[in-house]
Image (spheres, coloured by chain):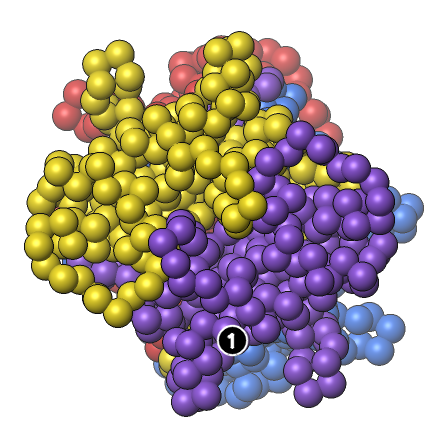
Chain colours: A purple, B yellow, C red, D blue
Amino acid sequence: MTMRTIDRMKAGFRSFKAAYYDQRPERVAHLVESGQEPEVLLIACSDSRADPAILMNAEPGDMFIVRNVANLIPPYQPDDQYHGTSAALEYGVRDLKVRDVVILGHSGCGGIQALVQGAIGGVTAPDREFIGPWMEIASCCSGHGPDVDAVSRQSVRNSLTNLLTFPFVKSGVESGYLQIHGWWFDMKEGALWRYVEENDRFEKVEG
Amino acid sequence: MTMRTIDRMKAGFRSFKAAYYDQRPERVAHLVESGQEPEVLLIACSDSRADPAILMNAEPGDMFIVRNVANLIPPYQPDDQYHGTSAALEYGVRDLKVRDVVILGHSGCGGIQALVQGAIGGVTAPDREFIGPWMEIASCCSGHGPDVDAVSRQSVRNSLTNLLTFPFVKSGVESGYLQIHGWWFDMKEGALWRYVEENDRFEKVEG
Amino acid sequence: MTMRTIDRMKAGFRSFKAAYYDQRPERVAHLVESGQEPEVLLIACSDSRADPAILMNAEPGDMFIVRNVANLIPPYQPDDQYHGTSAALEYGVRDLKVRDVVILGHSGCGGIQALVQGAIGGVTAPDREFIGPWMEIASCCSGHGPDVDAVSRQSVRNSLTNLLTFPFVKSGVESGYLQIHGWWFDMKEGALWRYVEENDRFEKVEG
Amino acid sequence: MTMRTIDRMKAGFRSFKAAYYDQRPERVAHLVESGQEPEVLLIACSDSRADPAILMNAEPGDMFIVRNVANLIPPYQPDDQYHGTSAALEYGVRDLKVRDVVILGHSGCGGIQALVQGAIGGVTAPDREFIGPWMEIASCCSGHGPDVDAVSRQSVRNSLTNLLTFPFVKSGVESGYLQIHGWWFDMKEGALWRYVEENDRFEKVEG
């Protein structure tokens, strides 16, 4: 029996609705009435295998989430252009007043792989118009290749650096109100790593 | 007993790891070895109360997800700038070859609310640098205010229009390979609506 | 990759422990400290496909559960013998003071099938020592065969009758404190039925 | 907002139905069509806080489950009486041919507490007709009191002994086809222990 994902999503919504709105309304009532008050802003990859709500067993209200290809934070660059990730960062930190910003990278990232392939001379997808410029954010990391996962971890470091170019992040961190975290999900092993600044390396947290 | 979300996330990861990698490895084994093959690309809001994996009861591999403030699709604009949402759209449609693109709006959206407040003369957060320009994508919809939810639904329509400005989306839709969907989550009622093009309005799907 | 169920159970326990004790301790804290206070006592079949906690999406503390072959309630028969189901009924109603007693039958029941086969002349499993006498509780229902599901529903009715032979159930029902319910799970259709006394038949509740 | 458990159960069923029958029918299809084939028979307490499907994160089809007060196995005693637990044991081992039988005890057991209180001279609930005789199965363990949890663990040992009085269990174990396990759930710590025969004591498995 083969079922299209789009149909499974609708059935999944029925299950969610019954489980929360009908069965345990107290789980969502406050959120609906009082608005969201997440403590955490998380930037994750769009990869379907690294969904943060599934990975962290989250419930509604837990995390304000940005997802883009390769979980990148661009540098602070205020102008009239559309900056989706920066806008979310601004809204999360300044308006929602989250206490933690987490950048969640993962192994086997397709965006990082495209970056690495481009950097080592291969002409990857020459007719692509957006993925190349977007991955430029992490171009400084490609020297850590050809190991895609090493570049991916370096890119998390780089995004942490970019994060601090945003004045409202920097001041939040300096005042101690805000904490920033670099996490990395090893999809193959099912392990979670975190970046430890003191010794400039990733250490296993779980798994 | 009060627990910080960031700590609950780590415990949640242990639960995920035990449930999938240890208990039912068959649920993730293929994904890890063969790479992702999602059928659906979904653009959702960053709002912590409208997490698509929770709403759709998803499992790893189901959906390639973009999340930004107000689930906006900017118009096609290929240049050297960083376009996170466009890059994800390109990667999902052209490289992953998804069959469905879903734009998922929701009620009580903070980004839309900021847009509406700005449009009706209030000077909302004058010192914000990114949220204003970002919400410009939906500026054409603000005339449907002051009802925030009406503007939100109009913005889903607008994003569907923008979606078709991308040549690879347009050709996919025309060839029948790709379908695009505008969905809207009524958080208060726990209901899911979808945009029906024929009669240009939203109809309830579930709830 | 084949994994033994007994090993999946241990991994499942790790997931449960992380999700409740570590991640959301508030979900179990009260139960552990103050003792159980379930509102519902449910009698279900031992069948692995009709687990009431899975079927009802239950959480710890929700239901005091008895499970035996074919979800039978024997008649009131106080003597010095071991009466497991009666003891649980007594403890649930008199000590825990539940407000609802639910008998949950289901389609495709192996115990009922054995009863039906025996009743229509077949000598089912002549060397079995316990299942035959146990199914005698429902022997009055076998005339509704050979349709196993019809006999199963009749047996739920019969157990409701037996339930009222217990003085503490009868008085609870008469005082209005206690309600008794006959439910039936159609495993094939994924539907839930309930017995309606007024018109002496089962009506679909969900599905 | 206070909701009765019986109503939450109905909503929970809708969620189950949507999640399995509608969204992921492959999870139940085989079970419905081919019948159950559980590898494990588990005897657990009726306690609402120690539901084995929740504790082991089970799915339909995983475990054939008996639940009675204090998870007791009576000794082999074939006669014309109703023996619910023995009937389930017979059906599980002889007809379903499970490979593992697990007795799952737990801390803070109300049935064991009643046994201990009775044994130390208190006249517990003199008007109870069934719980006293039923708990007689574990009467030999009450000397391990007044520590309720020590008696509970001793009772798991005792049930393992009783299990081997059933000829079909004994022969199964001797042939190596069947394994029997004594597990104990520490509800306070969220830990799982197992009985190790070689050194006659319980060792922590998880937690």
Front-lying residue, B21 or C105: B21
Position of residue D33 measured from the top left corner of the image (x, y, whole percent): 60, 19
Q: Is residue B166 left or right of residue C94?
A: right
Q: Is residue B187 left or right of residue D52?
A: left
Callout 1: helix, strand or loop?
A: loop
> Which image quadrant: the N terminus of chain B?
bottom left
Position of residue A44 measured from the top left corner of the image (x, y, whole percent): 55, 56
Residue at the image point whose x is 82% and y is 70% from the top: D197
Chain of the residue where label 1 is placed in the rendered structure: A
Which image quadrant is residue C186 in?
A: top left
User: Does residue A156 lie above or below C200 as drawn?
Assistant: below
Residue at the image point whose x is 84% and y is 49% from the top: A120
Position of residue B194 measured from the top left corner of the image (x, y, whole percent): 30, 27
Front-lying residue, B67 or B19: B67
Residue at the image point whose x is 69% and y is 57% from the top: A139
Front-lying residue, B97 or B90: B90
Count of marks, rendered view: 1
> Which image quadrant: the C terminus of chain B?
top left
Pointer 1 local density, CA inside 10 Å: few below 14, some 14–19, many at least 20: some
Position of residue D194 measured from the top left corner of the image (x, y, whole percent): 72, 69
Which image quadrant is residue B37 in?
A: top right
Q: Is residue D1 left or right of residue D62?
A: left
Q: Is residue D2 left or right of residue C152?
A: left
In this orientation, does residue B116 appear?
yes
The amino acid on which the numbered mark 1 sits, given as a three-letter code, is Leu
Q: Check the image and name the residue furthest to the right.
A: D175
Residue bearing mark 1: A164
Residue at the image point whose x is 84% and y is 45% from the top: A121
In this orientation, does residue C75 appear?
no
